[in-house]
Amino acid sequence: MYDYLKALHVIFVVTWFAGLFYLPRLFIYFTEAAEKPEAEKKILQDQFMIMQKRLWYGITWPSCIVTLLFGLSMIHHWFPLSENRWLIIKLIFVLFLVLYHLSLGKILKRFQRGELPYTSTQLRVWNEVSTIFLVAIVFLVILKNVLSMFYGLIGLVGLIIVLMAAIMAYKKKRQS
């Protein structure tokens, strides 16, 4: 039974992260569409809003719930927290991931009200946050060692610096 639960957990983690990666991209496109002429803006934003809602309610939320249910079921049956200290740290990261997930829902609601709360550059930066959680959680699950996860996060910081430089270079290119 454990292998089936684990497989299902991983499948829904993947679909949850697909939503967490793609939804901020749709936010970026929605925000950038506001700079288009009115007719084009309306068509694009209407389409992006439909895509955002379908992704959020059809994939991201259900995947989040199922991921958490399968994960908690595995912890309950096979991973007592007293014997798996790495799992406590993982659960903290998962808690922050859920908070990130909820923040995307708040952004979506603001878009639905016609607000544009962030620039496309700010959303590009926010889009990378889920990558940090993914790397931290995967390192913990595979290595089951907080120190190894720390080294992985140091590497991730280097990646973030490269990504931020790429975002800024892209922004400069778009403006010129």
Image: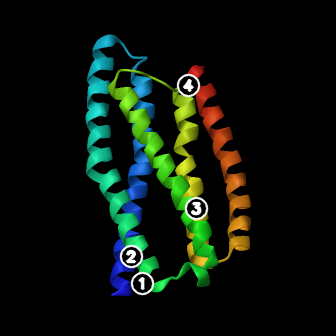
* Tag 4 secondary structure: helix
At 28% from the left and 14% from the top, the residue drawn is 39
At 44% from the left and 41% from the top, the residue drawn is 104
Q: In the figure, 174 relative to 6: above or below? A: above
Q: In the figure, 161 relative to 32: above or below? A: below
Residue position for label 3: 92
Which quadrant of the figure contains the N terminus?
Answer: bottom left
Identify the mark nearer the N-term, 2 or 4.
2
Image x and y of residue 8, in percent: 34, 74
The answer to whether 133 appears left or right of 12 in the picture is: right
Q: Please identify, in this view, whether the residue under mark 4 or under mark 3 is nearer the observer.
A: 3
Residue position for label 1: 77
User: CB under 8 Å between callouts 2 and 1?
Assistant: yes
Between the C-alphas of marks 2 and 1, the distance is 6 Å
Between the C-alphas of marks 2 and 3, the distance is 17 Å
Q: Residue furthest bottom?
A: 1
Residue position for label 4: 174
Residue position for label 2: 73
User: For mark 3, does the 10 Å Cα neighbourhood hold few (<14), some (14 to 19), or many (20 or more) residues?
Assistant: few
At 40% from the left and 65% from the top, the residue drawn is 68
Between the C-alphas of marks 4 and 1, the distance is 52 Å
Q: In the figure, 7 relative to 125: above or below? A: below
Q: Amino acid at mark 3?
A: Ile
